[in-house]
């Protein structure tokens, strides 16, 4: 039985009910294990209190802290998940001229999970529209990125890197690239704004709490928290279980905090679960899902073979 037929045979509602019996996945916490590199064309080595190499965790000052502490991914049920972003950044810093730094969009990579770099999906959070935005989607949603080659010359119509946005606005580019804290020799361009792609039909809603746990809306008059963490929660609803499994089973996630990538945070999630013994129908469901996962892994393996001839 092929995977497609499997999902036709088992109605989504039934799969959802079965899922509710089996999932015991705990939330996954992604700690910040990457540094960002602040530079101009001259690559200053003394920027921002960073080490002599020019690398560090977060580009910020006392009046505008950007540090992001962690991301928590929670697979809620068959078609729902939340991604929570814990950061000191309040989502708005004016740079004058009617322009401001906003929260960056989220980026997902299912092509090379467990390895930095790569981008296959973008999640628009809704902070990049409007006259002071930086040109991304203003309506939250999940989009498949078909032009996956990141550049810093605005040649990708679907993703802007922080360098695309800030090179023409300032002599400084902050956090234009990121790398593992323990290995700066391999660095990756930082995707920060989603500007295109194919709408995957997911529902995405975003809410925010301030450090005191009160509802919060970023904006020009919003207070800056010198300590404590804002919590952005992106609530995702997939159009089907198969869509959820395809996109959010094993993946990397990257967030630059602001669209200038002041604090890149990256990590991997593998939410495949270990089922407990259940009735035959449930085992058939799990078998089908494993087939789908196997197809994905085969696709990933082939992609790696193709990229490493
Ligand atoms: Ca960081
Ligand atoms: Ca950090
Ligand atoms: Ca990757």
Image: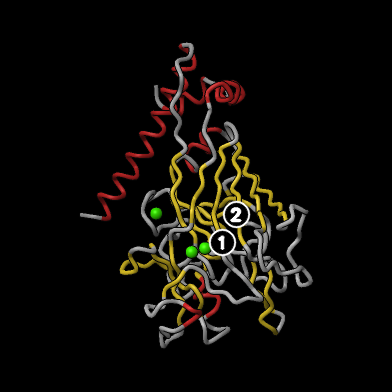
The disc placed on residue 259 is none
Residue ID at (46%, 24%): 5
Residue ID for mark 2 = 85
Instruction: Say which quarter of the image contains residue 291.
Output: top left
Colouring convention used in this rendered image of the protein = secondary structure
Tell me if mark 2 has few (under 14), some (14-19) or many (20+) residues whose alpha carbon lies within 10 angstroms of its own: many
Looking at marks 2 and 1 on the same chain, the residue that comes earlier in the sequence is marked by 1
Tell me if mark 1 has few (under 14), some (14-19) or many (20+) residues whose alpha carbon lies within 10 angstroms of its own: many
Q: Is residue 23 left or right of residue 206?
A: left
Residue ID at (69%, 49%): 205
Where's the N terminus, which quadrant? top left
Query: Is 34 above or below relative to 165?
Result: above
Residue ID at (77%, 54%): 215
From where the camera sits, is residue 234 visible? yes
Where's the C terminus, which quadrant? bottom left
Q: Secondary structure at mark 2?
A: strand
Query: Is 28 above or below relative to 67?
Result: above
Query: Is 84 above or below relative to 46?
Result: above
Horizontal and vertical percent for residue 98?
A: 72, 80
Horizontal and vertical percent for residue 294?
A: 36, 33
Residue ID at (66%, 81%): 95
Residue ID for mark 1 = 68
From where the camera sits, is residue 158 visible? no
Instruction: Say which quarter of the image contains residue 238.
Output: top right
Q: Is residue 168 left or right of residue 181?
A: right
Horizontal and vertical percent for residue 169?
A: 58, 83
Q: Is residue 248 left or right of residue 208?
A: left
Q: Seen from this angle, which residue lies furthest top?
A: 279
- Discs 2, 1 touching: Cβ within 8 Å: yes
Q: Is mark 1 within 8 Å of ligand 2?
A: yes
Horizontal and vertical percent for residue 52?
A: 38, 80
């Amino acid at each position: 039985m092929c995977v497609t037929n499997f999902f036709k045979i088992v109605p989504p509602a039934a799969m959802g009910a079965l899922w509710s019996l089996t999932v015991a996945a705990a939330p996954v916490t992604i700690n910040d294990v990457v540094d960002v590199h602040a530079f101009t064309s001259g690559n200053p080595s003394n920027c921002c209190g960073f080490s002599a190499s020019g690398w560090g965790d977060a580009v910020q000052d006392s009046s505008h802290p950007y540090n992001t502490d962690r991301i928590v991914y929670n697979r809620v049920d068959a078609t729902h998940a939340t991604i929570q972003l814990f950061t000191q950044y309040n989502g708005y810093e004016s740079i004058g001229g009617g322009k401001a730094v906003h929260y960056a969009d989220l980026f997902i990579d299912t092509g090379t999970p467990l390895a930095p770099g790569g981008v296959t999906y973008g999640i628009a959070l809704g902070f990049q529209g409007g006259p002071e935005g930086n040109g991304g989607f203003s309506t939250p949603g999940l989009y498949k990125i078909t032009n996956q080659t990141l550049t810093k010359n605005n040649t990708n119509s679907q993703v802007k890197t922080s360098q695309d946005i800030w090179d023409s606005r300032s002599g400084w580019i902050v956090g234009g690239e990121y790398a593992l804290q323990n290995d700066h020799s391999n660095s990756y361009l930082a995707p920060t704004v989603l500007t295109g792609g194919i709408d995957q039909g997911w529902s995405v809603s975003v809410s925010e709490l301030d450090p005191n746990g009160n509802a919060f809306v970023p904006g020009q008059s919003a207070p800056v928290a010198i300590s404590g963490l804002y919590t952005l929660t992106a609530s995702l609803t997939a159009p089907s279980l198969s869509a959820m499994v395809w996109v959010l089973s094993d993946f990397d996630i990257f967030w630059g905090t602001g669209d200038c990538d002041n604090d890149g945070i990256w990590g991997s999630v593998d939410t495949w679960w270990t089922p407990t013994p259940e009735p035959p129908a449930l085992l058939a469901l799990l078998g089908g899902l494993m087939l789908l996962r196997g197809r994905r892994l085969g696709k990933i393996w082939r992609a790696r073979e193709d990229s490493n001839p």
